[in-house]
Image: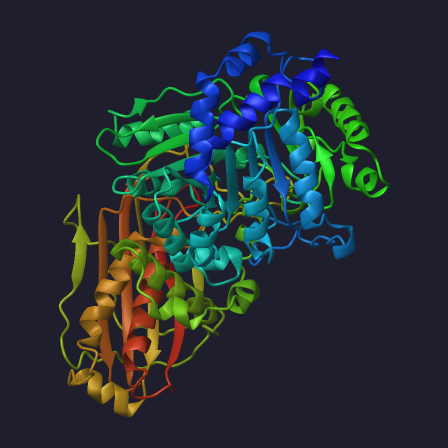
Amino acid sequence: MAAAWGRRGGPALLRGALGAAHGRACSSGAPVRARAQELQSSGRARFLLEHAAPFSAFLTDSFGRQHNYLRISLTEKCNLRCQYCMPEEGVQLTPKSELLTAQEIITLAGLFVKEGVEKIRLTGGEPLIRPDVVDIVGQLCKLEGLKTIAITTNGINLARLLPRLKEAGLNAINISLDTLVPAKFEFIVRRKGFHKVMEGIHKATELGYRPVKVNCVVMRGLNEDELLSFVDFTKDLPLDVRFIEYMPFDGNKWNFKKMVSYKEMLDTIKQRWPELEKLPCEASSTAKSYKVPHFQGQISFITSMSEHFCGSCNRLRITADGNLKVCLFGSSEVSLRDHLRSGASEEELVQIIGAAVSRKKKQHAGMFNISQMKNRPMILIGGFLISKTYPHVIFSSFSEPALMSFPLHQDALQNPPYSKQWGHTFSHWLTLRASFCVFQKDTSSASDTKCLEASPVGQVSVDSQSKQASPGSELSNRNSGSCTKAHSASDSLTHTDEEGQATMVDVGGKPESRRSAVAVAIVRLGEKAFGMVRQNQMKKGDVLAVAQIAGIQGAKLTSQLIPLCHNIPLSHVEVSLRLDEARCAVVIHCSCQTWGKTGVEMEALTAASLAALTVYDMCKAVTHDIVIEEVKLLSKTGGQRGDFSRV
């Protein structure tokens, strides 16, 4: 009886009056605030506070956790096609007739609010593709006692809908964004839209949302190299960038090696910002928050794996098809939709909900090893992560067929990026995509032509440690046959683990040594374009000079373009371009050098490829009959597998 009175009497009514007044910005804000002030000063309010029953027994589990936060999935559909959010075989969507209607959502939400829920978050799928999402927010805003209406979105439709959503009563936003590199974003989600997401973030800040939360799932080998960029993103914007530890779900082929722990992320950030300050947090918060002094925004860490927060969990979830999940990690569900449609009374629904909550386990759905759990795919849960991190598919998709089938949209080429750094990375990502065509060319040419330097081109280099030329950087004319000399070739692939999944090679135990590599590429231009390059008559400028710089930039950005490459501190990069009049071609030689634990052949090959593609780009207005060929490694030195030379 006390619990029932507590639900419908004292605390619920008081929460309804005061919560509606202070928690939301509905259209009737002024009258509600006046009502709250009246209640606070009245004897009835004091009576209710003094005689309030405990928090609803139906939303309190056997460990004393009080669940006042409800997440509702509005749809299973999404307007992106992320390869990592769904299993490789796809997901079977629930028929529309079996999904919750808007009225059923409001009915269930109202029931939970009466029981003490103070915050509702709308998720998906992608909640903003549901046509009636604004109406749903408006109806939720009318529920007395509900303090916060939030939404988690991929941001594609946010800028367009946000003014109406704010007017309807939405007062908290989480935006999923796992990369600040436009081209990486487009490749990952297989749709254009990076600039729409950024527009949505800026629109949210313009409309006064404080903070705008940005969810970033951090994955080793995919985006952990962007940690500092995300922190810097908070410098001039009121954002809360939330770094989330990668968690296992059906279809995402979770691997412990791919998880970057909170402490590792924190150490990386503190190396750049040692003055990083820890912020206080609420008892039920899932985030550990920090702030760089004088930055407008802050960062947070969601330590789902390394330091779980099950002990203070206050969350429940309703899936788009109406199932109640009391734990994100658990597969156990109760269909509220079926009971609702069968005519169950409010009291019966409350009993069903209470029974499910009472069965909630202490942590991680009672599993000892959550990496082996069976659960819905993430897209169907609408849970904590609507993430963009499925590294197994991402990595394996860098094969030639998948990369070449990836659609590049015109607006991604035309719209300027949000920073020069992103712009450079974007262009190199695109050229890398094209370079996969180059690598498939036949390199067994038997031609024996001399390389004539029609117009000398000064060699351009970046040299941070050594002035010594890279071995092999001065190359004489030679036959272009494909005979090679190599030592200690491996019989197995080093970039796959015991399960056959792509993984980054651990070079921590390798000895440091001087390493170098030389790569070459040839661009056949045809007589007209070749003559214009030789006379420096191209409208876009000096083809050879620009291509040299592009090659150097490509070498330095290799780890951002090839996901399993390590970020290497190059001590020397040299790019030279020669004009071969006999073949009407530009011959590109690139050499790289470092002192480290891994080789630089990928840096040399990337430099040659990007220089070649830059030549193509600057000459294509004259002719498209341009052929890029013989992109190949000429030599490498250093490393446990010995030296290599193409002789």
- Residue 323 picture location, percent across and down: 74, 38
- Residue 605 picture location, percent across and down: 36, 60
Farthest residue toward the bottom? 528
476 w.r.t. 217: above or below: below
179 w.r.t. 25: above or below: below
Q: Is residue 407 visible?
A: yes
Q: Residue at x 34, y 46 (%)?
A: 205
Q: Residue at x 16, y 62 (%)?
A: 460
The quarter of the image holding the C terminus is bottom left
- Residue 114 picture location, percent across and down: 65, 28
**Does residue 518 appear to the left or right of 307 in the view shown?**
left
Q: Quadrant of residue 471?
A: bottom left
In this orientation, which residue lies closer to the viewer: 316 or 584? 316
In this orientation, which residue lies closer to the viewer: 28 or 20? 28
Q: Is residue 57 visible?
A: no
- Residue 144 picture location, percent across and down: 57, 32
Q: Residue at x 44, y 36 (%)?
A: 31
Q: Quadrant of residue 139?
A: top right
**Does residue 65 appear to the left or right of 209 in the view shown?**
right
Farthest residue toward the top? 50
The quarter of the image holding the N terminus is top right
